Amino acid sequence: DIRRQRLPAFPQTTNAKRIEGLGRDREYPVLEATHLYVGELVVLDSSGYAKSGTAATGLVCVGVCVEEANNAAGVSGAITVKVRGGIYLFNNKSGDEVTIATIGDVCYISTNEEVCLTSTSKSVAGVVEYLEGGLVAVRVGTWPLQVGLLAKRSLTLLCLRLGFLFAHLLALGVVALP
């Protein structure tokens, strides 16, 4: 079944398993001295070059590597890597676990195969879809990053602000309760 296709493993142990794809594959120029393996999270650095996912700020998660790309001896941009967005299963970082309370909210990159709950010194991995047997199903790609602003915590904050605004307008007599 293509919806639950296991990606070939890269040298490090990975649980990245494709659940659902989002559109077509995209290609990005690879950072110098970088070797990307099938199944790992791929991010763009501040210069727009692809590299392995890592715990750092300022990175944009663009998806999962679908074809190995070895630019270990090349200059930045000498080759491209093929990346696919979608829903994938990733390891859940021990001690900083994503929980069911996080479903619909964003999670963060811990390593190229692991996501976590807290944002300190990390970049967004994607939106948590569900948890499965200790793994986290995450919608990755550029789309989740954009909607990350509309995740549950942000919506809660927006509702609180609207509530305060309504209370203020009520106190001023601009609006009235029926």
Image (cartoon, rainbow, N blue to C red):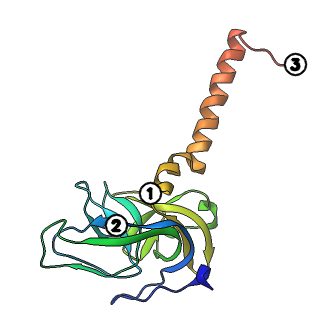
Mark 1 and 2 residues: CB-CB less than 8 Å, in contact?
no
Q: Is residue 129 left or right of residue 78?
A: right
Residue 93 place in picture, x, y as percent: 45, 74
Residue occupying the point 38% across, 77% down: 40
Q: Secondary structure at mark 3?
A: loop
Question: Alpha carbon of mark 1 to alpha carbon of mark 2: how far?
Answer: 13 Å
Q: Secondary structure at mark 2?
A: strand
Could you classify mark 3 by the number of other residues whose Cα lies within 10 Å: few (under 14), some (14-19), or many (20 or more)?
few
Mark 2 belongs to which amino acid? Glu
Q: Depth check: 91 or 3 in front?
A: 3
User: In the rendered structure, which disc, 3 or 2, sits on the residue that comes first in sequence?
Assistant: 2
Q: Residue at x 60, y 43 (%)?
A: 155
Q: Is residue 154 visible?
A: yes
Residue labelled with disc 2: 27
Nearest to N terminus: mark 1 or mark 2: 2
Task: Identify the element where label 1 is drawn.
Answer: helix
**Viewer-proximal residue, 85 or 16?**
85
Viewer-nearest of labels 3 and 2?
2
Disc ID at residue 142: 1
In the rendered image, which residue does mark 3 sit on? 178
Residue type at mark 3? Answer: Pro
When the figure is inspected, residue 158 is found, relative to residue 2, above or below; the finding is above
Residue 114 figure quarter: bottom left
Tag 1: residue type? Thr
**Which residue is rendered at x = 70% and y = 14% of the image?**
171
Using a 10 Å C-alpha cutoff, classify the residue at mark 1 as few (fewer than 14 neighbours), some (14 to 19) or many (20 or more).
Answer: some
> Label 3 to label 2, Cα distance in Å?
57 Å
Binning the other alpha carbons within 10 Å of mark 2 as few (below 14), some (14 to 19) or many (20 upward) gives some
Q: Is residue 122 visible?
A: no
